[in-house]
Amino acid sequence: MSVVLVGANPGLQLFDDAGVVAAASLWTVDWSVWGVGTAMIVADRSGWRTIGTDEHLARILLERFTRHFPEFSGLGPTDDITHLDDRVEISSDLFSGLRASGGGVRLRIGGVKDRRQFADPSFPLGDTSLALSNVYLPCELGELSIDGASVEGAPKCEYVGGRWSSTSYLAVAEVWSENEEPAAVATLNGAGSTGGSTGPRRHLRAVQPR
């Protein structure tokens, strides 16, 4: 298999009584076929924004990966995206979690409950798929603020089948690789809708014993 991206991709999904209110995907790309860099992608019921000093890379990560993640399902189409050209500052460790900020967004993920390997030989990304592996760290805490206003909501953190799983998590040592079909480089045209996977949730499925 040919590797297409190496890095880290922590994430957060927040809920209120009505359902999903917001989600955030933080990318640190150490190497990829599209370049390197850091970007944060955030969506709530008012829309989507990407943050980073490389707008092209941020859009590739959005179009090729994040918009297909089940965590972002139900948060609206990606037709109207605001990009903020700002450096994403990250402070992270595998003991306590991370803090990230940039473009008026502040993200906190903390309270690490577990550390384990995750692997999916064919993770669905729209009309294609890639092999995914990482070290997954479910966390009990997750906070998000946008333009100074805290997003009202909380992550779902559960202990099921002898394992912790959470919609607030770190994902490090992450590798995306081609499986059977070559990975197509995303373009900046035809954003489409989030759609979401019809299969199991991205990391919550790791709760189920294999």
Image (spheres, rainbow, N blue to C red):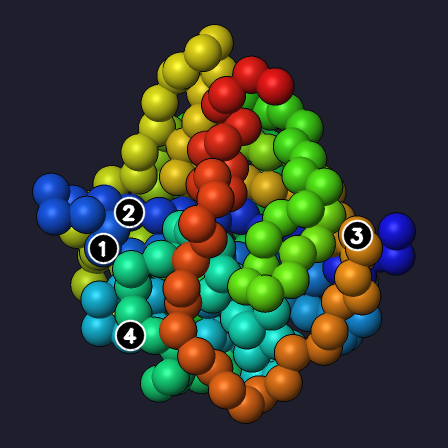
Q: Residue at x 23, y 45 (%)?
A: 15
Q: Residue at x 46, y 53 (%)?
A: 197
Check whether the beta carbons of the residues at disc 1 and disc 3 lie within 8 A of each other.
no
| Number of residues whose C-alpha sits closer than 10 Å to that of mark 1, classed few (under 14), some (14–19) or many (20 or more) | many
| Number of residues whose C-alpha sits closer than 10 Å to that of mark 2, classed few (under 14), some (14–19) or many (20 or more) | many
Mark 1 lies on residue: 21
**Which element type, helix, strand or loop, lies under badge 4?**
strand
Check whether the beta carbons of the residues at disc 1 and disc 2 lie within 8 A of each other.
yes
**Which element type, helix, strand or loop, lies under badge 2?**
strand
Residue 200 showing in the rendered view = yes
Q: Earlier in the sequence, mark 3 or mark 2?
A: 2
- Is 162 rendered above or below residue 68? above
In depth, the one of 210 and 103 nearer the eye is 210
Estimate the spatial distance between the alpha carbons at disc 1 and disc 3, rounded to whole Å. 33 Å
- Is 45 rendered above or below residue 23? below
Mark 3 lies on residue: 179
In depth, the one of 129 and 5 nearer the eye is 129
